[in-house]
Amino acid sequence: MQKGQYTGIVTISGDGLIFECINGMMSRPDWKDLADSLIFGFIPAGTGNGLVKSVTAVSDPASFSIEEAAFTIVKGRKMGLDLTEIELEYQPASKIYMFLSLSWGYIADCDINSEAIRWAGPTRMTLWGIYRIMARQYYNGTFTYSGTRISDRKTSPNFIASPPAKQTINGTFSHLIIQNIPYISFNMHSCPLSRINDGVNDITIHMGDKSRAQLTKFVLDNDKGEFFDKYDNFKPNGMEYYKCLDWELKPEIKGPPPKDSNIKMAEGVKVMDNAIYAIDGERYPA
């Protein structure tokens, strides 16, 4: 495919095929030319469809359907979309471009491991989520970021006027998700302060020292993005909300390196098969 050969690409799929299309384009040496000339359109046909929901919600938060997505494409409505460039430890020479989210901990577990009950459709996430609250897991690591912790709904950090210094959170996590867009699924408004082209990542964190009751409340609030009370303050569900420009995540327990790699783990590093990231719904070793 060359610049000008096609004017657009439309997928009828879930977020996974969109991920493949975007990363396929970004892996080409002429990606800048293609990015300037190609328009992507998306019609929802997957389990989550977070990107389509985030796009249609810009004009109408209540709107989400195949017809609405197709109508938006036919009318030629366009908007920018942020991509986050990710460098993984096991494949530093090959960048990954995220449009949706990177999750580690509770959400990643529900997203990836619930594939075992895919027959349940979108309900699989709920069923696995209940299981993971009852059989709770903890994730040790270090998260370094350049950004701001949000104290209420009205907080609006100005990173251009005052670039933030790097800060570090070290300890035991239950959940961490980094998002480009407000919805990670059509029914999960997990970062309500996010915009699809605001140039920053929105991050929610739930630490392991919070109670199971707080984790349950956070999960329930997470579906609809109902993190705020009537005064626009955060509810007492144990969640922390950040906006940042760049970040680095170092889990204490690593996933196994790819079988075709020559990577040797340092002595003493813990390796487990279930140490994973979910990046735009795809499984990657942590």
Image: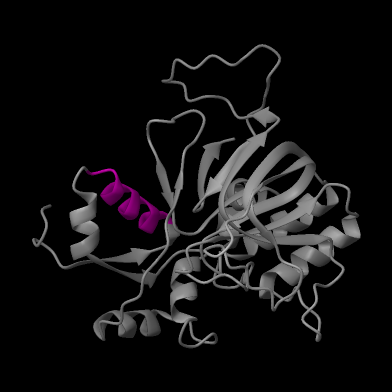
| Residue drawn at x 71%, y 76% as measured from the top left | 153
Where is residue 80 shown, x and y percent of the image?
A: 36, 70
| 135 lies above or below 270 | below
Q: Residue furthest front?
A: 161
Location of residue 73 in the rendering, given as x and y in whole percent from the top left corner? 29, 79
For the C terminus, the image quarter is top right
Closest to the observer: 44 or 86? 86
Say whether residue 7 is left or right of residue 163: left
Q: Main secondary structure of the magenta part?
A: helix
State which region is magenta: 16-28
Q: Nearer the viewer, residue 140 or 159?
A: 159
Q: Residue at x 35, y 70 (%)?
A: 42
Quarter of the image where one finds residue 56: bottom left
User: Image point 44% across, 15% down: which residue?
Assistant: 262
User: Is residue 130 in view?
Assistant: yes
Where residue 273 sits, quadrant-wise, is top right
- Identify the residue at image location x=77%, y=50%: 132
Q: Residue 52 appears at what percent x and percent y? A: 44, 72
Whole-percent x and y of residue 62? 54, 87
Residue 151 within the magenta-colored segment of the rendering:
no
